[in-house]
Image (tube, coloured by chain):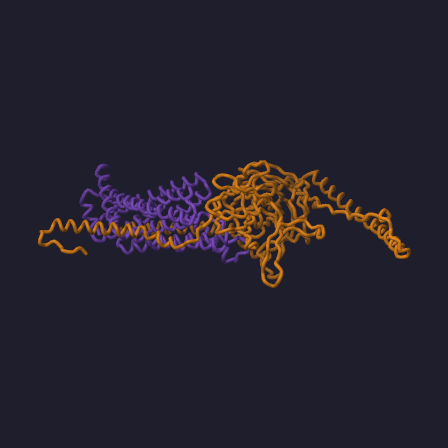
Amino acid sequence: MKLRRVSIALVLMLVLVTGMAWAAEVEPRVAQTTQVPEEVKKGQGQPDKEVQFVYSLSPWTGSEYGGTFAPRQASTIYLMANETNILNSLRSEVYYWDITREYMADWFGFKEEVPGTLEILQGGKVVKTVEKTDYVYSYPDGYDGRVQLVVGADAILEFERYNQLTNDYWDAVSAYYDEQAAWQATMDKLLKRVQETGVYAKPEEIPPIPEQPTPPKLYVTSPVQAFVFDLPAGQYKIRVKSPDGTIVEHSEKNLVVFESRRQGVGFQIIPESKWTRPVLSNDKSQVLYLEGRRVFYLKPFHEEEFNQYAYVKMASLHKPLEGLGTKSAWAWVHTEEIVAAKAQILKDGKVIEEIERKPFYVEQTPGYALGYKIVEWEPDPNYPDSAPTFEAFKIELEAKGLYQMRFVDSEGNVIPGSERDIRSVNATTWPLYILPLLPFIIGLAIFFWRRSLKVEQVEGFLPEENKPQTVV
Amino acid sequence: MSVSYRMNAVKVTAKRELKSTLYGIGLYVVLTIIFLITSYASIRVSIMNVVNNGIEAIQNPISWPFLVTVFLASTYLGLCSAISISREREQGTMEVLFYGPVDSFSYVIGKYLQQILTFGVVLGFSIIYFFLISQITNFGFTAQFLGLLFLSVFLASSMVAFGIFLSTLAKKTIVGVVSFLALVLFFLIFWAAHSVIMGISGTNMSTALIYTRLVLDNINLVIQWISPIAYFVRGMVAVSVGSLGQYLLSIISSAIYSAILIALAIITFERRGAKR
C-alpha cells in the first residue's frame, strides 16, 4: 500500500516537473511578445534605439485601414481574411516607449525601404508571391468620409486626378479673387456715381456677384509602394526575398489570417432622454425592453464578430501587452453604417410603420438649467456651415406587448441580422415575491398529506382504546 | 451479478431515494429560497434597469436567473449525493446494503438516477415559475430558453456525478461535503472572475490587470474541462450564438464528463469497498 502511494507521488512529481520544464521552455518565446528585452529597455527616459527590419502594416480593420508595425520581437502578424491588406518591408530605428507600453519606430529619423519580393508559405510551400506596387488612399467624400484603396497604375492616375482637381480649384480661387476685385471696382464706381448724381443705377448696370468656387471633396494620399494582397483564412509564414535571391534577415514571421465567427447588424440606440449615453445592441438574440412611451434613434451598422486576441493584435501589434489573455474572447466590430435602408416596425407580423433615415439636431434649451430637444435638421442658407448632430432612424413607441423591428434595403429585402424584438416591461414587482412560494406551498401540502397518512396508519394499527384523540 | 438483478437494484435504490426526497420538505424549501433569490437579485434588477434607463438592449432577462436556479439546484443535488453516500458509508448502512443484491455499479447508478429524476421535478417547477414570471413581466418565453432547459439536465448530471465522485473518495461526510462545496465555490468564483475580466475593454488596462487576465485565461484552458459550470456555460454560448453544432458538442461533452466521473466513482467504490 505504502509502495503504491509512493509511486503515485513520484508520478505526480514527474508530471509537475515536466510541466514546469515545459513552461520554462515556453517562457522565452512568450517573453518575446509579452515582455520587453532588457537591451531595448535600458537607458530609462531615453530608450536605446535599435536598427531593425520591420514590417509596416496597414491592415483592413473592417471600417478603415489601421496603422501598426511588426518589430523584430513580434513573431506573428495577424490579418483579416479575404480583405486587401498592405504590408511593407522597411528598416528603421525601433525603441520601446515605457510610458505608453509600445514599440515605436523613428520613421522620420531613419527609414529605409527594403527591396524584394514577399513570399507567403503554407505547409512549407510558397503559395503566393507578392511584388511591391503603388497604392493610394482615396477619400471621395473628404478626409472624414469613407476610404477607398487604389492600387497599381490606377493609384498614380487617382493621385494625378486629385492633383488636377486641386490645381483647378486653386486656379478657380485665383480667378475668383480677380473677378471679385473687378466686381468691387465696378460697384465702387457705381456707388460714387449714385452719391454724386443722386440717381439710382439701373438693375442691368449692376454686375452679378462672382461665385466662390467650391473646394473638391476628393482627397488622395501620395502614392507609396508596398505589398498589397489578400488571403483566405489560415496559418501562413512570410518572408522577404531580396533581389539577389537571399532571404532578408529577420523577415521570417508567422502570419495568422482570421475570419469572423458571425456577421450581423449592430445598433447604436440613442434614447431621447439620454442622447449622450447611447446603448449598443450587437447581438440578434438581444431584445429591446422599454417601459412606457419611448422615443429613440437608431444607427444601424453592418458588423462582424472576431476573436478578440487576433483582432487586437492585428490593429496594435506594436503594443506587446495589448490583447493578452483574450484568446477565448470574442468581440463585435461595427464595419459600415447602413444608410440606404428603411426601418420597419411590425406588430403581429404586419408592418405598422416604416421609418426613413433623417438628420437631427440637438438644440440646447435657453437659460441656465440643463435641457435640450432633438429636432429634425434642415439646411439653413444663412448658415452654410451648419451640420446635423447625427443622422438616424427615429422610433417612437408607446410599447404595449410585443413588436418586431427590422431593416429593409432599397429593394425591400430584409437585411439579415437586423431583426430585433421590442417588448414593453411590466414594472409591477410584487408578484415576484409571491410566485417563489409555489414550491413551498406544494411541499407543505405533501408534508401534511404524508403526516395524515401516517396518523391513519397508526390509527389502523393501534387498538381502539389507545387511538389518539387529537391530531397535532 | 446478472444485468436484471443490477437493473432491479438500481430501480429500487433510485425509487427509495426519490420517494424520500419528494416526501420531505427540504427540496421545496430550497427551491423557494432559490426562486426568491433569483426574483429579488436578478429579475427585479432587470426590471429596475429598464425602468431607470427607459430602454435596454439585453438578452432575455430570465436566462440568467434560470442559470442561477439550475446551478444552485444542481449544487444542492450534488451536495445531497455527497452527503448521502458519505453518511451511508460512515453509519455502516452501505455495508448492510452490500450484503444484499447491491454492488458498486447499481448503488452509484441508483444514486445518480435518483438525483437526475429529482432534477426533473426541479425543472418542472422552474418551467412553471419562469413561464409565469415571463408572462407577468413580459420578458418573453423564447425558444432559446427551451434550449437552455434541455441543456440544464446535463449541467445537473455533471454536478451530481461530480458530487458522487467526490463522496466516493471521502472517508467522512464532512470531508465529502467540504471538498464538494469548496470546489464548486472555486469553479464559480473562477468563472465569475474570468467572465468579468474578459468583459473589461482591452485597451489601456493596467499591467497587473493584463497579466491577471493572461493567467486566468491560461488556467481556464484546464478548468474548462474540469468544472461542471464550464460545460453549461459553453452550451449557453452555443444557444446565444445559435450554433447547433456547438450545442450538440456541449451536450455530448457534458454526457462524457458525467460518464467518466460515474465510472471513476464505481471504480473507487470497487477498490475501497463498502466498509467504514
Near-viewer residue (B236 or A153): B236
The part of the image, by quadrant, that contains residue A153 is top right
Residue ID at (13%, 51%): A459
Residue ID at (20%, 46%): B98
Residue A276 position in % (x across, y down): 57, 55
The hue used for chain A is orange
Near-viewer residue (A323 or A73): A323
Residue A290 position in % (x across, y down): 49, 50
Q: Is residue B18 visible?
A: yes
Residue ID at (60%, 50%): A71
Near-viewer residue (B144 or B233): B144
The hue used for chain B is purple
Residue found at the very far bottom of the displayed protein = A368
Direction from residue A223 to residue B101 in the image, left or right: left
Which corner quadrant holds the N terminus of chain B?
top left
Direction from residue A178 to residue A368 in the image, left or right: left
Q: Is residue A251 visible?
A: no
Direction from residue B264 to residue A193 in the image, left or right: right
Residue found at the very far front of the displayed protein = A199
Residue A193 position in % (x across, y down): 90, 54
Question: Considering only vertical position in the picture, is B157 above or below A427?
Answer: above
Residue B80 position in % (x across, y down): 29, 51
